[in-house]
Amino acid sequence: MKAGMGIDIGGTNVKILILSDKGKPLYSDRFKTQSERGLRDFCSRLGLKVKEALRAVKLNIKKAAAGMAGDIDSEGGILRYSPNLAGWKNAPIAELLRKETGISFSLENDANMAAWGAYVLELKKSVRDMAVITMGTGIGGGLILGGKLYRGASSTAGEIGHCVIEQNGRLCGCGNRGCLEAYCGSKAIVKRALSLIKDQDSYRKKYGIGDEKKINAAALAAAAAKGDKTAISVWEETGFYLSLGIGNILMLLNPSAIVITGGVSKGERFFMPALKKGLSLYSIKTPLKKARIKVSKNPDLGSYGAALFALEL
Amino acid sequence: MKAGMGIDIGGTNVKILILSDKGKPLYSDRFKTQSERGLRDFCSRLGLKVKEALRAVKLNIKKAAAGMAGDIDSEGGILRYSPNLAGWKNAPIAELLRKETGISFSLENDANMAAWGAYVLELKKSVRDMAVITMGTGIGGGLILGGKLYRGASSTAGEIGHCVIEQNGRLCGCGNRGCLEAYCGSKAIVKRALSLIKDQDSYRKKYGIGDEKKINAAALAAAAAKGDKTAISVWEETGFYLSLGIGNILMLLNPSAIVITGGVSKGERFFMPALKKGLSLYSIKTPLKKARIKVSKNPDLGSYGAALFALEL
């Protein structure tokens, strides 16, 4: 039996998943990334986990795909830079992992793997052109064009989070102004909500957010569900700004589908009407009518996408 | 000998061009579009011109490509809508032309044909992923991805002019706010300059712009060349706004090249430094470094592109 191994390397957790060629999960594992322990330590720990996985499934797996956040040279298997991973630079991760495990690794941007996952799982490969927007703390994106993963000339395509939607707009974590991420990433949404909440203690009490818990996107979705006007207006604002990011993708790429994933998608009910209203302001209607906009509930599109992608290698 | 026929159908003029398979021009003609005379009248006039061209070159041409501004259903050979062409709607132009001439027509967006022209003539097919921005009265765009014309799901891809760069920004001719076209199309540039020029009569005299001539992009480039501060600042502003349109394409598509064409490119000397400075504000550097930004001096990329595209059919 053919099987695919996918790895999702996040800033906090690493997920390992082995899928059968029919897409059935055969094995899964996760561990803490702890990137501050250094690159070689990380590759050695990941290598052990991969070997453990291979022993467990007893299948002849020769190829794996790993997705990670950051600027990836996918041809060279090199992480050029990742702000989330202790600032690792020019790290030859594919080669280090091959040495540790004896199998070959495709290194890809994590949003690209999520895009592949959405393409196969959410859309059953029924479209040729689609985009995925990963809306977490930051915003990433991946493109499937002509039924293939589109990487661009140096495998950084899909950076929708750092497309500018307002000239000289809000300061983004990246240092530039007006990036979509500065409006619609969960960090930006929470910051905006906190600036509007006068008394955080009573807000916590009112919406059952424990003292130890952060007010995050999920908490704001819960508050909106209970009718909180501040949360509702922040979600509406988010939907409008998101319409500019998505509208621009529709104008430029005319895809058949856009899939939204990540923690922010928990606010779907509250941002979707404003998103649709914002899109209706675009005057070229053909690409608006053509594209299905869907929120994925699958929290593991990254690891599933990587394993499904490995099956194609 | 194989030859390709390309037609560029603009709001004012129609250009017909026949190229040999080596790209040598064998025949060219042009006539007034006069779309107000109606669709059938137009197709009949174009049909006669095409038959005249075929008789003149005495070659067995079976296929032609025609580019026109507007929302094109390239699969069906139908112009869905064009604001420039007397509001023509759902016009089965490819079929009408086939009936008139006996040869088959591929109907494409004009910026897509300019993109193909730039891909072959400006870049000698040396890249796989590139974008063309046509900067005339309005702003269009075309994409070559993976070495192929990318049309998207309903052949409207590449509408960079109607990507929003400023939420709730300047009113665009399309009805939406903040579109790139509302900042960098020649109409927008001229409008901005006129709003800054206090005395248009003395301005005309000073820069040798005749009374009968409009102050257009070329006149503003000439004024800037003579050191006019208003014109220079308008071009600098244009360069900055253009950096947001181009920067967003770089983030999303990571192409190897961007080719700028059209009347506005006459201001290259004056907008290019601000464009480059604007791009340097983007924080993800890999796609910035990768992309060559080039201005094409060829005023006929549309008809050349269409003829070259026809050679591939």
Image: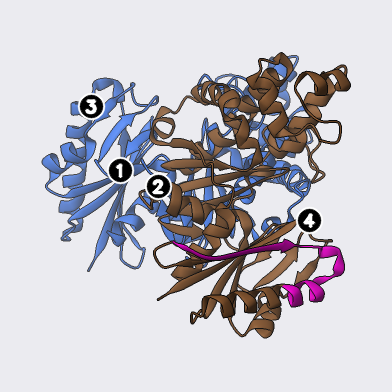
Chain colours: A blue, B brown
Q: What residue span does the magenta drawing correspond to?
A: B24-45
Q: Which residue is mark 4?
A: B84
Displayed quadrant of residue B218: top right
The quarter of the rendered structure image containing the C terminus of chain A is bottom left
Marks 3 and 1 close (CB-CB < 8 Å)? no
Q: Is residue A127 visible?
A: no
- Labels 2, 4: front one: 4
Q: Which residue is mark 1?
A: A74
Labels 2, 1: one chain: yes
The Cα–Cα distance between marks 2 and 4, rounded to whole angstroms, is 36 Å
The quarter of the rendered structure image containing the N terminus of chain A is bottom left
Q: Which residue is mark 2?
A: A151
Q: Amino acid at mark 4?
A: Asn
Q: Tell which of B123 and B143 is nearer to you.
A: B123
Marks 2 and 1 close (CB-CB < 8 Å)? yes
Q: Is residue B172 visible?
A: yes
Q: Amino acid at mark 2?
A: Arg
Q: Earlier in the sequence, mark 2 or mark 1?
A: 1
Q: Which mark is residue A28?
A: none
- Circle 4: element type: loop
Q: Amino acid at mark 1?
A: Ser
Q: Amino acid at mark 3?
A: Leu
